[in-house]
Amino acid sequence: MNYSTLILDIIYLVASVTFILGLKMLSKPESARSGNLIAAVGMTAAILGTIFLHQGAISSIVYILLFGGIAIGTIIGWLAAKKVKMTAMPQLVSIFNGMGGACAALISLMEFPEHAHSPKLAIMVMAGLIIGSVSFSGSVVAFLKLNGNLNSNPRLPFYNIINAIILVFTLGHGVYMAVAGVDSMNMAVMTMGFALLYGVLFVLPIGGADMPVVISLLNSFTGLAAAAGGFLYHNEVMLTGGILVGSAGTLLTVAMCEGMNRSLFSVVFGAFGAGSAAAAGPGAGATGGTVKDISVADTAVLMNYAKKVVIVPGYGLAVAQAQHVMHELEALLEERGVDVKYAIHPVAGRMPGHMNVLLAESNVDYSKLKEMEDINPEFDTTDVVFIVGANDVVNPAAKNNPQSPIYGMPILEVDRAKSIIVNKRSMSAGYAGIDNELFYNPKTSMLFGDAKKVVTDLVAELKSM
Amino acid sequence: MEHILSFFSSHQQMLFMLILMVFVGIEVIGHVPSVLHTPLMSGANAIHGVVIVGAILVLLNADPNKPLTLVFGFLAVILGTLNVVGGFVVTDRMLEMFKKKPKK
């Protein structure tokens, strides 16, 4: 046995262990950061080992391209990850995932001519090609949607049928090529084209609150594409890493769906907000009733004399970059003896846990962030609920309107508090595109304006009292 | 049938690993609090960047006289590196926010 192959095998084994350990540690708050680091170290070892323990002569041009590619990828990836605003994180994760998918698809395409005549391996090539391509184009669409470049959720008639036909055709085409031993590169490119098209069609109609679930699903797809590559090369670390992400990612996707009380099936195939969005234009009076305004000064008085204030932050807060001044407001109220807490809905922001990251960034004490199950019983004793830029997560329709697309989603039961103040820029519908009857509740007052400006004014008002 | 059997015998080890890893993956992230869903997804995202190993292998085995293979291999390495580096760095940045702050 050759020593360097043996060493490489050991490195791969160790790397696989770091991936498992890393994932395990990532699922606990205390150890999450070290878990990520451990997996990163394992990955680095696997990459370096693959390069330096490689058998056979390597021409200098290959070395230049290899290290050049790694350098370019490292610099761009590092800068993008460091520079991106915390609010834009979900789309960044999505695009990184797409890169992985594209990488898997490219590898498969290049390996295709070599393995076309061996059905066993050709099927792996096709799997990597199709899954990688779907993951890539789907992630790009998810990126564009989250980034706000693509706002519509177009749905052709017979949408699911068209999609199913394209999917079956793509898969059938791939299997046929593998089994029949077709070695035409053009045909392989065609398979890739169909897979790319399916990825776009798959994600395009899914909108609103379901995007994190889709990203998580595409994430596990890329894992499977990587695993297909592992099979192809008989490469253990690619197989373990890929399958690990594939299965953990699938479980995570299901857990996210549960957080929203939706099934994976309805996320992928069901229309979300498609029917109701039209009815919920700006100021839609469908729910009836009138909306009550409140001034900043009155809000300040109300909060100043409250015993307990619960802040419900939503994505609107993050977009307005109001989390820092919000922390200031919280500190000011606490100084005056008001008990202030944050109610964090599991899907507040654009992804589960997104809001916690945003608030932690502005130094809000971790112990003040309350999860939904913990805060809901507390609303009965709450004097003022201050909702900033959140909408769907406090929509009572989720509880009492079976027709609503978000029916069944657990919500923050803010209507149990004595008074509710909602800060929004306008009466427009939330991310899910549906009207919110909470705004017509007699206990609710609307404080219109940009979140940052409103909270800044509130702080100033409180200071002068 | 013969195909399936020969596939099994030639990839026996790989198949064992595959099945075991499916269970490990499920087991390892059971009961994760929803707060950590985003970082966990992002961390898993970085881990599937292991596909870079495949890209490296393609490039290392590439025939230096075939420019197209070299270009695609080069691209695949860039994409894979982006996935790995970006994934780990952004996860770390998220988790950095979670560390306990000393009380003022």
Image (tube, rainbow, N blue to C red):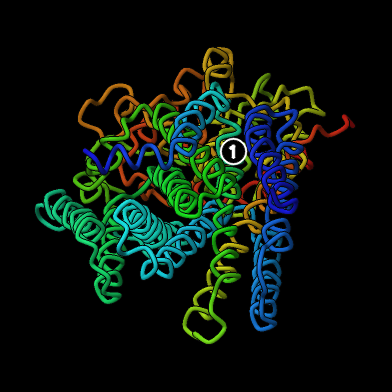
Which quadrant of the figure has residue A186?
bottom left
Query: Percent from the top left, x then y, of residue A330?
Result: 73, 34
Q: Is residue A344 left or right of residue A121?
A: right
- Residue under pointer 1: B40
Q: Is residue A450 above or below residue A353?
A: below
Quarter where residue A192 is shown: bottom left
Q: Nearer the viewer, residue A417 or B56?
A: B56
Residue at 75 percent across and 28 percent down: it is A30
Q: Residue A306: where, in percent of width, then height?
A: 66, 22
Mark 1 Cα shell of 10 Å, populated few (<14), some (14-19), many (≥20): many
Query: Disc 1 on helix, strand or loop?
Result: helix
Residue at left 22%, top 55%?
A: A179
User: Along the line of sight, which residue is nearer the eye, A39 or A217?
Assistant: A39
Nearest the eye: A405 or A220: A220
Whether residue A430 is visible to the viewer of this picture, yes or no, is no
Name the subunit of mark 1.
Answer: B
Q: Is residue A290 above or below residue A100?
A: above
Q: Position of residue A249 (x, y in %)?
A: 48, 38
Say whether residue A13 is left or right of residue A174: right
Where residue A45 sits in the image (x, y, percent)? Answer: 74, 51
Q: In the rendered view, would you say A204 is above or below A219?
A: below
Question: Residue pushed farthest front?
Answer: A1
The image quadrant where one finds the C terminus of chain A is top right
At a point 53% along the width and 12% down the height, the residue shown is A377
